[in-house]
Image (cartoon, rainbow, N blue to C red):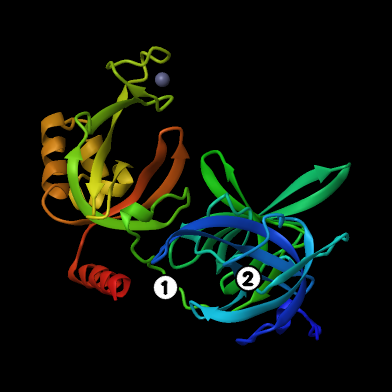
Amino acid sequence: MESAIKKIEELVKEETNITIKVKILSISQKEANTQKGKSVYHYGLLGDPTGVIPFTAWSMPTTVRDKDVYQISKCYTKKFNEKIRIYFDQGTEFKLLPEELEVKRTYRYYSIRDLNTNDKYVTVEGILSNEKEREYEKEGQKKAIYQYIMRDQTGTIPLSSFGTKLPVGKGVRIEGAKLDLFNGYYRLNTYEKTAIEDVNLKITEDPEYSYIKDVKTPVGGIKVSGFIISLGEKSGLLTRCRECNTKLDDLRCADHPEAGVKYDVFIYFTVDDGTGYMQVNAGFDAISEITGITSEYLSDEKMPPLKKEIRSRIDRGLMHGAISINGNARMTEQGISFKAMKIERLDQKNYRQIVSIQEEEFA
Ligand SMILES: [Zn+2]
């Protein structure tokens, strides 16, 4: 006898002989090495109007395609990685149904650091700040757009909300925000179907450390640590036009030869933390404290700064010990480019924090 059709939301424990009516959302294939040799199995996602669940098919008719709707009987559920999953085997029966089936959309949760535009609609949690209101026109009507910076324990990202003001300074969970890449940076947008709810979050001001190998996302507020393994040859003192601020190769700006120059510092280097390395660039604000190069020193009219002295302060400050870098990642044609906003010497507290992250990771 055929059992009654179960809804996906009812599949919460391990059961056998289940019948479901579902739409196949995705199918992937994997090779496994068994004692009998190589075998192929399939896995993917399926859903119905009540939810979406992953499946593993040890056996499945070759005619099963994604986007088709089936009544599937004699399948079973089991826990895998603490989550309920549907399994098909040789006894499972598939009946193709000539109908459409609506599937409940669910959005995967991501830490800001782990966002990826391969998944365009996502769930994120964080605290919003820096509210800005702007107006724009759509079909002759004035509308408001609210812009925020969203922060979680791993990073920051700009978020825009069309028409709706969002709560600032407390935890929010945003389901179905749209992720895109703009001008080299990720940003989130909310729209009509986005669900926003208050949640209790414990997020400290200080972001958690990321491993350099995990910095693949163009978001802000990323913190890494490591050692500088090479400092760019042209790092150090540079001159800018007082009038237009352009970086000068000469002592005069071609457009403003009379304006005179002002001094600035810029460095670029490669940092390595044992998991990987990356290119970083940094300006005066990021390195002033750790190098002791002050704005007074750079702007002393009577004693202009010396290239050699600047370079030796940079070497002393940055090249002898582990540092911590807080900054923003940007996507360029060459990959991720990292701009440091603050570089500090790694103190004991931060050192302990890294050790505890590592212990967690390898536990
Ligand atoms: Zn100029």
Depicted 249 relative to depicted 155: above or below: above
Q: Amino acid at mark 2?
A: Gln
Q: Can you identify the residue that label 2 sits on?
A: 90
Which mark identifies residue 333?
Answer: none
Q: Name the foreground residue: 200 vs 262.
A: 200
* Label 2 element class: loop
In the depicted structure, whether residue 113 falls above or below residue 230: below
Residue mark closest to the camera, 1 vs 2? 2
Please indicate, yes or no, whether residue 325 appears anywhere in the rendered image: yes
The picture quadrant where one finds residue 211 is bottom left
Q: Disc count in the image? A: 2
Q: Residue at x 72, y 65 (%)?
A: 105
Residue 131 appears left or right of 349: right
Q: Dot 2 surroundings within 10 Å: few (below 14), some, or many (20 or more)?
A: few
Q: Is residue 267 left or right of residue 76?
A: left
Q: Residue lying farthest front?
A: 36
Q: What number is the disc on residue 204?
A: 1
Q: Of the residues shown, which amino acid type is indicated by label 1?
A: Thr
Quarter of the image where the N terminus is located: bottom right
Whole-angstrom CA distance, mark 1 to mark 2, is: 51 Å
Rendering coords of residue 38 (x, y %): 44, 58
Q: Position of residue 336 (x, y in %)?
A: 41, 42
Q: In which image quadrant can residue 164 be found?
A: bottom right
342 or 66: nearer the viewer: 66
Is 203 drawn above or below residue 228 in the view shown?
Answer: below
Give the x, y percent position of residue 42.
58, 61
